[in-house]
Image (cartoon, coloured by chain):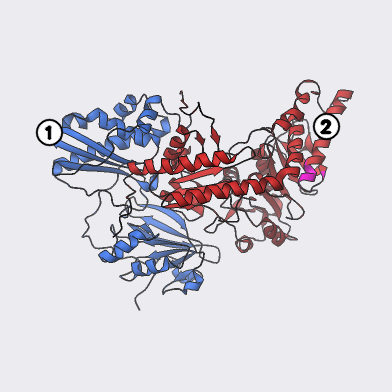
Chain colours: A red, B blue
């Protein structure tokens, strides 16, 4: 179906960095030779094969350093979803004789939730750690779910929706010496928090290339030395036999360049994003009556602003904002394939009708102050318009 | 297909909805379907003269297609006789909008149902009051909203949830908890008697979030209490009863029964107060 963009004569304001990020032009530049001149298969024995292999191994070292791991612990995959598959299914199948019980949190990305359901169908037991009001996992609630037959705990580093940060280090510490593998899906936090698998006592960590402004179609699974997995992709035995298929060298070089840039610029960039994000949150809450911030007021990703507005529905809001050139997202059921509202918002204790009225704005490397000003103009206007249509919102009449 | 792959005509009716508003007077009937819990609620106002829809207005809470179908149906039926209007179906509405994404077809159902509800209410002489945002039932996502029970109906008695004894002192309270224990918590207060709503309002200043759950169709208590409830941040779940407490060692969630739809769902909470008479 044709879609019209009435705002196309103005520059679009992109505030959906959580869904996808542009590839940094410096990354594109680094990748280009690997499409045309240095295209060889790194497994080939000839000179060009050696050059491709060297480029790939150099990238592996850079990415390992980015998370304080060893190069041989980096497995390249097709993206974070595949990394999550290899971590959960690959670990569960390989270690079944040690136990049958897996623990995840209610905050997880949809891919982890669906993997947990898949494992349940295949005979595993899954416990889910509830969240507090702000979306945080309490390490004591992790401990309360550990049993003798627990083999794996998976808690995301931060919520991909509401941006709440999780106490990964504390959870890693409490799992120490228990013979339980600890996995985190770090994708939402990747370009915003310093990553360190040693500090956090991680055994498995999923990363995505695009979330540090690298190309799509590439991910990483960090696998601590000695953690046994069953491969899910069978073939020529690349990546230590854990992930067959000729490696995507151009993308790997791109992710490595993206990691280098992130390493140099992250701290400064996070401070800049936080200032912009705080202006956005304060501005919206101050100008829109009956508006609320979802997630934690301070323990949240520096680029995340997640609101809910009484009496309106999120998909309508996103459509109206689209007309104003603002690219936004919502946790409303009406925008989803299942017509179910955001699982994370429900796990925070919100009622369905509250979850329907949510708006997610996420900032990134190319967000400028004028983008925030545009959102601060458009959001209150769109909310006001929808409330005029809504039978659920009556203007406050002082009594 | 994406849920928002709307036709130009649908987007036009969403951007510029026709006939938004309410109507008043003796010759007006109101129809209502949907539920905010499911993300859509529609109200149709019709003014009937000589068995014809002389004027029609609507208010809708919902997604893009919910707004567009409400708007389109008001255009389609304005001026029709009531019998003609009753023959307008969901597919007429969807066709008039040049189609809807498959997952949004139920929205066109809602618009036709709201109109038919208004016509039936007119014919039966039923006067609905405009929507009171506080009198929203708990969790009903069926295509047809149940008729609201009469305001005078006595609230059904409510029983303590299963597991009450197990979670006593671990998040479940039969008397008012120490306010110092409520900070940062999500509290659910069950309507267990005349003091419950007053307590819920008091607790709204102590806990991070308070939900008041009652089997009644309307808020209990006197006008003053209701007015205070409307101005507070209290969340209100009507036509609901507590079924069972859950959690690993401590109270973490409560199973709720929605009386209108006879459905069950889980609500994540940290504390539940059920004030027993003592």
Q: Quadrant of the C terminus of chain B?
A: bottom left
Which of A329/B137 is in front? A329
The x and y percentages for residue A344 are 53, 50
The part of the image, by quadrant, that contains residue B219 is bottom left
The residue wearing badge 1 is B51
Local crowd size for mark 1, using a 10 Å CA cut-off: few (<14), some (14–19), many (≥20)? few
Q: What SS does tag 1 mark?
A: loop
Identified at 34% across, 50% down, the residue is B261
The x and y percentages for residue B27 are 14, 41
Which of A108/A299 is in front? A299
A69 inside magenta stretch: yes
Residue range of the region highlighted in magenta in the rendering: A63-70
Total number of numbered labels? 2
Locate residue A215 relative to residue A260 in the image: left or right: left
The x and y percentages for residue A320 are 43, 36
Q: Is residue A268 above or below residue B156?
A: above
Q: Is residue A228 above or below residue A169?
A: above
- Chain holding disc 1: B
Tag shown at residue A55: 2
- Chain holding disc 2: A
The x and y percentages for residue A396 are 33, 54
B137 inside magenta stretch: no
Q: What SS does tag 2 mark?
A: helix
User: Is residue A202 something that shows in the picture?
Assistant: yes
């Amino acid at each position: 179906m044709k879609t019209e963009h009435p705002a196309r004569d103005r520059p679009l304001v992109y505030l959906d960095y959580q869904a996808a990020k542009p590839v940094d032009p410096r990354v594109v530049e680094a990748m280009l030779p690997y499409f045309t001149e240095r295209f060889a298969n790194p497994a080939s024995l000839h000179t060009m094969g050696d050059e491709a292999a060297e480029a790939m191994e150099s990238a592996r070292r850079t990415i390992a350093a980015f998370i304080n791991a060893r190069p041989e612990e980096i497995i390249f995959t097709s993206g974070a979803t595949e990394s999550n598959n290899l971590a959960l299914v690959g670990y569960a199948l390989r270690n079944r004789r040690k136990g049958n019980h897996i623990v995840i949190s209610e905050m997880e990305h949809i891919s982890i939730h669906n993997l947990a359901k898949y494992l349940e169908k295949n005979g595993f037991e899954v416990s889910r750690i509830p969240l507090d009001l702000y979306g945080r996992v309490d390490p004591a609630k992790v401990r309360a779910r550990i049993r003798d037959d627990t083999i794996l705990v998976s808690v995301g580093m931060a919520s991909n929706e509401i941006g709440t940060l999780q106490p990964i280090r504390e959870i890693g510490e409490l799992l120490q010496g228990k013979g339980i593998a600890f996995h985190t899906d770090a994708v939402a936090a990747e370009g915003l928090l310093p990553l360190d698998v040693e500090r956090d006592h991680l055994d498995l960590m999923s990363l995505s290339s695009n979330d540090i402004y690298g190309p799509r179609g590439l991910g990483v699974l960090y696998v601590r030395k000695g953690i046994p997995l069953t491969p899910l992709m069978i073939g020529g035995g690349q990546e230590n036999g854990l992930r067959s298929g000729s490696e995507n060298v151009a993308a790997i070089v791109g992710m490595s360049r993206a990691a280098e840039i992130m390493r140099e610029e992250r701290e400064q960039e996070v401070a800049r994003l936080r200032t912009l994000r705080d202006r956005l949150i304060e501005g919206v809450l101050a100008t829109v009556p009956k508006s609320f911030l979802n997630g934690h007021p301070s323990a949240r990703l520096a680029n995340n602003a997640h609101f809910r507005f009484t009496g309106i529905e999120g998909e309508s809001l996103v459509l109206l904002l689209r007309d104003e050139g603002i690219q936004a997202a919502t946790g409303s059921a009406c925008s989803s394939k299942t017509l179910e509202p955001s699982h994370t918002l429900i796990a925070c204790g919100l009622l369905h009708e509250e979850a329907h009225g949510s708006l997610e704005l996420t900032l990134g490397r190319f967000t400028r102050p004028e983008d925030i000003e545009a959102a601060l103009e458009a959001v209150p206007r769109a909310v006001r318009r929808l409330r005029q249509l809504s039978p659920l919102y009556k203007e406050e009449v002082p009594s | 297909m994406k849920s928002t792959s709307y036709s130009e005509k649908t987007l036009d009716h969403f951007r510029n909805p026709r006939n938004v508003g309410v109507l008043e007077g003796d010759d007006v009937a109101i129809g209502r379907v949907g539920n905010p819990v499911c993300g859509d609620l529609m109200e149709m106002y019709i003014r009937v003269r000589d068995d014809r829809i002389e004027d029609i207005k609507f208010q809708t809470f919902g997604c893009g297609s919910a707004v567009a179908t409400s708007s389109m149906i008001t255009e389609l039926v304005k001026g029709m006789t009531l019998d003609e209007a009753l023959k307008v179906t969901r597919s007429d509405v969807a066709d008039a909008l040049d189609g809807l994404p498959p997952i949004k077809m139920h929205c066109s159902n809602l618009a036709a149902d709201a109109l038919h509800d208004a016509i039936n209410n007119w014919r039966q002489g039923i006067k609905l009051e405009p929507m009171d945002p506080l009198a929203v039932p708990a969790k009903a996502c069926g295509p047809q909203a149940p008729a609201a029970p009469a305001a005078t109906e006595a609230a059904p008695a409510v029983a303590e949830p299963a597991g009450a004894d197990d979670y006593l002192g671990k998040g479940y309270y039969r008397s008012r908890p120490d306010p110092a224990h409520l900070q940062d918590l999500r509290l659910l207060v069950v309507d267990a008697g005349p003091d419950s709503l007053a307590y819920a309002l008091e607790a709204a200043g102590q806990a991070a979030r308070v939900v008041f759950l009652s089997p009644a169709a309307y808020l209990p208590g006197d006008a003053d209490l209701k007015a205070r409830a409307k101005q507070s941040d209290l969340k209100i779940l009507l036509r609901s009863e507590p079924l069972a407490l859950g959690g690993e060692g401590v109270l973490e969630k409560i199973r709720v029964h929605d009386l209108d739809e006879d459905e069950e769902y889980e609500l994540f909470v940290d504390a539940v107060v059920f004030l027993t008479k003592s």
